[in-house]
Image (cartoon, helix red, strand yellow):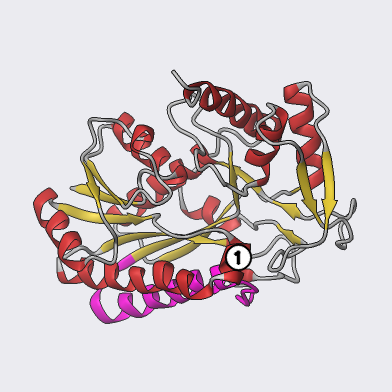
Amino acid sequence: MTILITGGAGYIGSHMVHEFADAGEPAVVLDNLSNGFRFLIPTSVPFVSGSTGDRTLVSDVIARHGVTAIIHFAASIVVPESVAEPLNYYGNNTMNTCALLDTAIKSGVRQFIFSSTAAVYGAAEESPVREDSPTIPISPYGTSKLMSEIMLHDAAKAYGLRFVILRYFNVAGADPRMRTGQATPAATHLIKVACETAIGKRPKLEVFGTDYPTPDGTCIRDYIHVSDLAQAHSSALAYLRNGGASATFNCGYGRGASVFEVIGSVRRASGRDFPVEVSPRRPGDPPSLVANVDRIRATLPWRPQFQNLDTIVAHALAWEKQLATRRKPA
């Protein structure tokens, strides 16, 4: 009954590992540490260094640990980088997912939870966006994830695989117990970058575009606390174990905050009026992405605990302060 967590040493994956460790759920982590860190995961959880595209390694891990389900977090996730380096994203996100699926199915694994993204919707014309809204990605990142979703649907029909696709909106915050959080040095997530600026790690915060068709001209996103997202995965796993049919769910709160609103929250939490600089729009950024969450709330017993922007920011800021202390030279 062991769960294989790919990308388990990364930001979201490590929260999932702690969630399972707290619940006594057996798990094993597979991560190549390109964006992950060993110190983010409990030492009690088995760790394997390697790629999801390594079929021999994955097959051995599944057999050796008795893996019955996979939660697949491992991916490249930076939208502007995907525009500049699209083939890297198709290789890591799509081709490696194909290899992982093939190996899992041949090894007898029939339950699969996939980390997808709201980027599959592209510049959504409706808000909140529903799971059955058109999927027209505007970045290679979004397309690479959508291609993986299509593979999952086809594999389910052909091989009896059952899956849950979770389309994340904007994930932020940190473990309230400060055991893990976003640790990638060059992360581009707005709340993390704003918190880094507030504690003096960055000289300024760039706002990419103030001419969007939104109330204050900046992009609007549905921010979800990372711990709530980890709990959504636990609910999805229980759903599959209870015989639930394959399904796709949006993961958000159903309301958005603008870039300027996030900046205001970070300024309040930190008590610092840090510098902000307006820059041109970035390629691949839609004006607004907010989740319709009716389906997940009607299907899963998932009840978020941290649905407040100021709470998300407070946890993210506390983590950044702890991380800065941890990285100081001895």
**202 to 107, vertically: above or below:** above
**Residue 220: image location, x then y, percent:** 76, 53
Is residue 159 in the magenta section? yes
**84 to 62, vertically: above or below:** below
| Left or right, 110 with reference to 122 | left
Q: Amino acid at mark 1?
A: Ala
Prevailing SS of the magenta stretch: helix
**Residue 135: image location, x then y, percent:** 60, 75
Q: Residues within 10 Å of mark 1 (few under 14, many from 20)?
A: many
Q: Is residue 132 visible?
A: yes
Residue located beneath label 1 in the image:
119
**291 to 275, vertically: above or below:** below
Residue at point 66%, 71% (across, down): 122
Residue at point 37%, 73% (across, down): 152
Is residue 140 in the magenta section? yes
Tag 1, which secondary structure? helix
Stretch of the chain drawn in magenta: 134-162
